[in-house]
Amino acid sequence: MPPVSSSNVASVDYDEGRHVLIVTFNSGAVYEYYPDVPREVYEGVLNAESVGKALNELVKPNFQYLRVN
């Protein structure tokens, strides 16, 4: 998982086969966002000036999530 510069997010990754966004928070919690997250959304979050803001705007209102740990 590529590390990111964020006060709340440790890393963001993308499962190409399942089209799932995987986010690890600094607390250690890991969440998968699904279904059918486009790769462009992953790239947008990864390259955003604010990863947290991008998650709040691009991901959380548009996809379901599951805590996996």
Image (cartoon, rainbow, N blue to C red):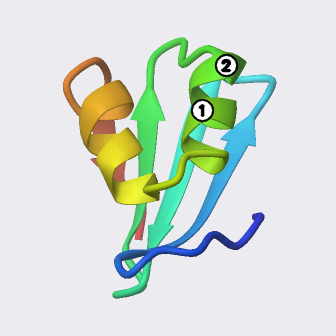
Res 26 visible = yes
**Residue 11 point in image, percent of width and height:** 61, 68
Separation of residues labelled 1 and 2 (CA atoms): 6 Å
Quarter location, residue 41: top right
Q: Residue at image x 35%, y 57%? A: 52
Placement of the N terminus among the 4 image quadrants:
bottom right
Tell me, yes or no, whether the two marked residues, 1 and 2, touch with CB atoms within 8 Å: yes
Quarter location, residue 34: top left
Q: In the drawing, does residue 69 fall left or right of residue 66?
A: right
| Residue 27 to residue 11: above or below | below
Residue beneath label 1, please? 44
Quarter location, residue 2: bottom right
Q: Residue at image x 36%, y 43%? A: 55
SS at mark 2?
A: helix
| Residue 23 to residue 37: above or below | below
Disc 2 packing (10 Å; few <14; some 14–19; many ≥20) = few
**Residue 16 point in image, percent of width and height:** 80, 27
> What's the amino acid at mark 1?
Gly
Q: Which mark, residue 40?
A: 2
| Residue 27 to residue 37: above or below | below
Q: In the drawing, does residue 53 fall left or right of residue 30?
A: left
Q: In the drawing, does residue 67 fall left or right of residue 18?
A: left
Disc 1 packing (10 Å; few <14; some 14–19; many ≥20) = some
> What's the amino acid at mark 2?
Glu
**Residue 24 point in image, percent of width and height:** 50, 68
Placement of the C terminus among the 4 image quadrants:
bottom left
What is the number of callouts on the image? 2
| Residue 66 to residue 61: above or below | below
Q: Residue at image x 80%, y 23%? A: 17
Q: Which mark, residue 67?
A: none
Q: Residue at image x 54%, y 12%? A: 36
